[in-house]
Image (cartoon, rainbow, N blue to C red):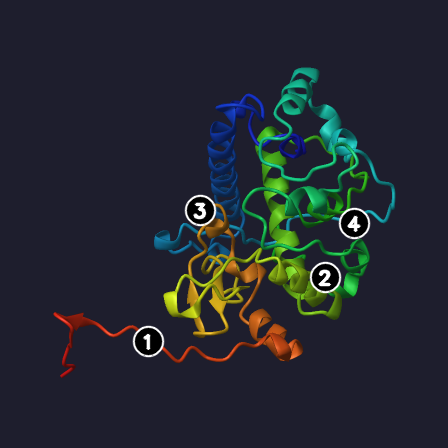
């Protein structure tokens, strides 16, 4: 269940040399494979709530009903190899191969002391996410309504909080992957709420100043920093886009990895509330537009 924290796939063969590009491809393929498995699971449990993505946008598939039971309240935190009782069922050979490929799709990981949230936010393609405070995640009020949207809710929450699971269940490899994917979905749904709080906006402000969300590709916006936005607040409806406050339009992220993130993890409200909160960051609207010409003459518009 937790082997992805060491490396998404052993196909990477390590973090150096030519293995780097292979590991990136392997990580992306694995994510799509896991999400496909989650879709199949959701179709079996509740076909009416399983919605497909727009194939033109290559969205991640991340929605479904809850199938979990009680939640643990333990505050114990483990290292990456022992974060849950479920991971103890992995054999030694798996642990060795995971350790070998540990740095392949994690940037800035500190090793065994890295929390799940830090690990997840440092994965390639997850640069848009900020780290949600543990205290926010532990407050049941902030998670109201999410248990009905995420399968394996309690197991996923334990994974996010690095809490030792008290359930003691043994899962198949497919179920472990479903729980890992459910944890990613649950974190995204918590994240969209967190970034609307004062602490969340402050965290996103730092990323905005560092151009972590990219710049507007429009020439006349002259490299204006952008903000992440979703076209819908419903999970699995569309992928995340970037919003330019200068031309007030949205664009696809430049990275293929970021292009697979669910737009509902950022929502339709965030960039506009962000600019209302930090009004000094709102730029003047772009005044110049491209004028098509033929042999120097403007084209007549009928």
Q: Which residue is mark 3?
A: 256
Residue 288 vs residue 78: left or right? left
Whether residue 144 is visible, yes or no, is no
Q: Is the residue marked by circle 3 packed among few (<14), some (14-19), or many (20+) residues within 10 Å?
A: few
Foreground tag (3 vs 4): 3
Q: Residue at x 66, y 65 (%)?
A: 205
> As rendered, which of 83 and 300 lies closer to the eye?
300
Dot 3 or dot 4, earlier in sequence: 4
Quarter of the image with the C terminus in it: bottom left
Q: Quadrant of residue 88?
A: top right
Which of the labelled discs sits on residue 143, or is there none? 2
Foreground tag (2 vs 1): 1
Q: Whole-percent x and y of residue 252?
A: 42, 58
Dot 2 or dot 1, earlier in sequence: 2
Foreground tag (3 vs 1): 1
Above or below 19: residue 202: below
User: Circle 1 — which element?
Assistant: loop
Q: Whole-percent x and y of residue 96?
A: 67, 18
Residue 170 vs residue 41: left or right? right
Q: Which residue is mark 1?
A: 289
Foreground tag (2 vs 4): 2
Q: CA distance from mark 2 to mark 1?
A: 45 Å
Residue 124 vs residue 131: left or right? left
Q: CA distance from mark 1 to mark 4?
A: 55 Å
């Amino acid at each position: 269940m937790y082997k992805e924290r060491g490396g998404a796939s052993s196909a990477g063969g390590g973090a150096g040399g030519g293995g780097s590009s292979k590991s990136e491809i392997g990580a992306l393929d694995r994510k799509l494979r896991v999400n496909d498995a989650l879709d199949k699971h959701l179709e079996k449990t509740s076909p009416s709530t399983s919605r497909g993505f727009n194939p033109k946008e290559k969205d991640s598939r991340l929605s479904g009903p809850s199938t979990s039971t009680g939640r643990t309240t333990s505050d114990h935190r483990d290292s990456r190899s022992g974060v849950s009782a479920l991971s103890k069922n992995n054999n030694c050979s798996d642990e060795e191969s995971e350790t070998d490929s540990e740095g392949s799709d994690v940037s800035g990981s500190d090793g065994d002391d890295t929390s799940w949230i830090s690990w997840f936010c440092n994965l390639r393609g997850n640069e848009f996410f900020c780290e949600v405070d543990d205290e926010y995640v532990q407050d049941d009020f902030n998670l109201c309504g999410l248990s009905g949207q995420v399968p394996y809710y309690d197991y996923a929450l334990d994974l996010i909080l690095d809490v030792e699971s008290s359930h003691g269940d043994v899962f198949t490899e497919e179920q472990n992957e479903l729980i890992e994917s459910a944890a990613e979905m649950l974190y995204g749904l918590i994240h969209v709420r967190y970034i609307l709080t004062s602490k969340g906006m402050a965290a996103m402000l730092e990323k905005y100043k560092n151009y972590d969300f990219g710049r507007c590709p429009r020439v006349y916006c002259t490299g204006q920093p952008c903000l992440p936005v979703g076209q819908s607040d419903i999970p699995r409806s569309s992928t995340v886009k970037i919003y330019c406050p200068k031309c007030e339009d949205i664009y696809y992220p430049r990275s293929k990895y970021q292009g697979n993130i669910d737009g509902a993890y950022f929502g339709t409200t965030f960039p506009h509330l962000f600019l209302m909160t930090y009004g000094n960051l709102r730029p003047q609207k772009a005044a110049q537009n491209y004028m098509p010409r033929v042999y120097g003459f403007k084209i007549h518009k009928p």
